[in-house]
Image (spheres, rainbow, N blue to C red):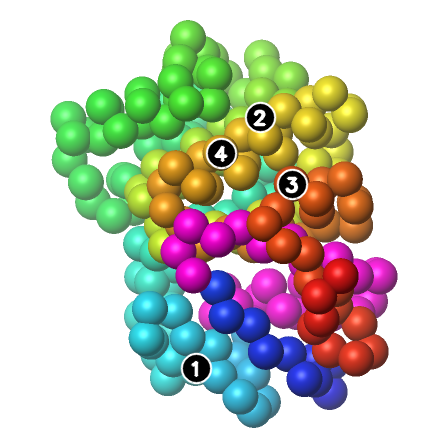
């Protein structure tokens, strides 16, 4: 069993960091929280819904509407503009384009990219790409934000800026946020820090 004695509750607006050595199960934990894996025992609930009881299609719909993701590798689509990348979650939710525009522009302004809406990803720095990812993760107002090593590919200055924006935007949106990181300075931007290890999940 990869994960044992893991008990975690998170409220809207709370921003949590999870640390741990490589191989202790941080990625597995994130996959369980996101409903990508199903637990052998226990449960994962989001807004009262037990994820293990949902069909694959229902889980996909829930992730699209209630979750936002920020990854180390950005996962910004290279053939879409900055605006189109950020608008993608709204398009998947079938929001009319005319209703998408003000929300997308609001999020781009919030992460300091209001003037780069028409730019292509190849024209952006790593820090800017991660800011696009943050805007995309929060544009649809998710209840849960999951950030997996979001500063792993960034220089220290860009990393500090991204961590500040990630916290600010998660807080302002009211989302519950989970930051998985190896970096102690990154973890210290969260409200509290938990460590995942042989003794389960415990306060740092």
- SS assignment at label 1: helix
Q: Nearer the viewer, residue 151 or 92?
A: 151
Pointer 2 or 4: first along the chain: 2
Instruction: Give residue 155's quadrant in the image.
Output: top right
Mark identifier at residue 129: 2
Left or right of 67 on screen, residue 203? right
Quadrant assignment, res 161: top right
Disc 1: which residue: 52
Comparing labels 3 and 1, the label whose residue is closer to the camera: 3
User: What x and y, as percent, mark residue 10?
Assistant: 48, 64
| Whether residue 118 is situated above or below residue 134 in the rendered picture | above
Q: Disc 2 or 1, which lies upstream in sequence?
A: 1
* CA gap, disc 3 and disc 4: 10 Å
Residue hosting label 4: 168
Query: Mark 3 — residue?
Result: 189
Kindly report the distance in space between the C-alpha atoms of the residues bearing marks 2 and 4: 17 Å
- Give the numbered dot on residue 77: none
Judged left or right of residue 84, residue 160 is right
SS at mark 4 in the image? helix
Magenta-tinted stretch: 11-35
Residue drawn at 16 percent across, 30 percent down: 99
The answer to whether residue 97 is left or right of residue 121 is left
The spot of residue 83 in percent (x, y) is 37, 22
Residue 166 image offset from top left, x and y in percent: 54, 36
Give me the C-alpha separation between circle 1 and circle 4: 31 Å
In the picture as drawn, the residue positioned furthest to the bottom comes out as 41
């Amino acid at each position: 069993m990869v994960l044992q004695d893991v008990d975690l509750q998170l409220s809207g607006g709370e921003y949590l960091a999870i640390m741990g050595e490589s191989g202790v199960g941080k990625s597995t934990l994130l996959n369980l929280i996101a409903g990508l894996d199903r637990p052998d025992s226990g449960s994962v609930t989001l807004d009262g819904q037990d994820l293990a009881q949902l069909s694959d299609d229902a889980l996909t719909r829930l992730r699209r509407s209630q979750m936002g993701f920020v990854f180390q590798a950005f996962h910004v689509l290279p053939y879409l503009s900055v605006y189109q990348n950020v608008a993608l979650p709204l398009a998947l939710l079938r929001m009319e384009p005319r209703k998408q525009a003000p929300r997308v522009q609001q999020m781009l302004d919030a992460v300091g990219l209001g003037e780069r809406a028409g730019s292509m990803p190849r024209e952006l720095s790593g820090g800017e790409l991660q800011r696009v990812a943050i805007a995309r993760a929060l544009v649809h107002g998710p209840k849960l934000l999951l950030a997996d090593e979001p500063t792993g590919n960034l220089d220290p200055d860009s990393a500090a800026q991204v961590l500040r924006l990630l916290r600010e935007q998660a807080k302002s949106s009211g989302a519950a946020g989970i930051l998985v990181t190896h970096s102690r300075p990154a973890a210290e931007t969260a409200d509290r820090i938990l460590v995942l290890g042989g003794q389960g999940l415990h306060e740092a």
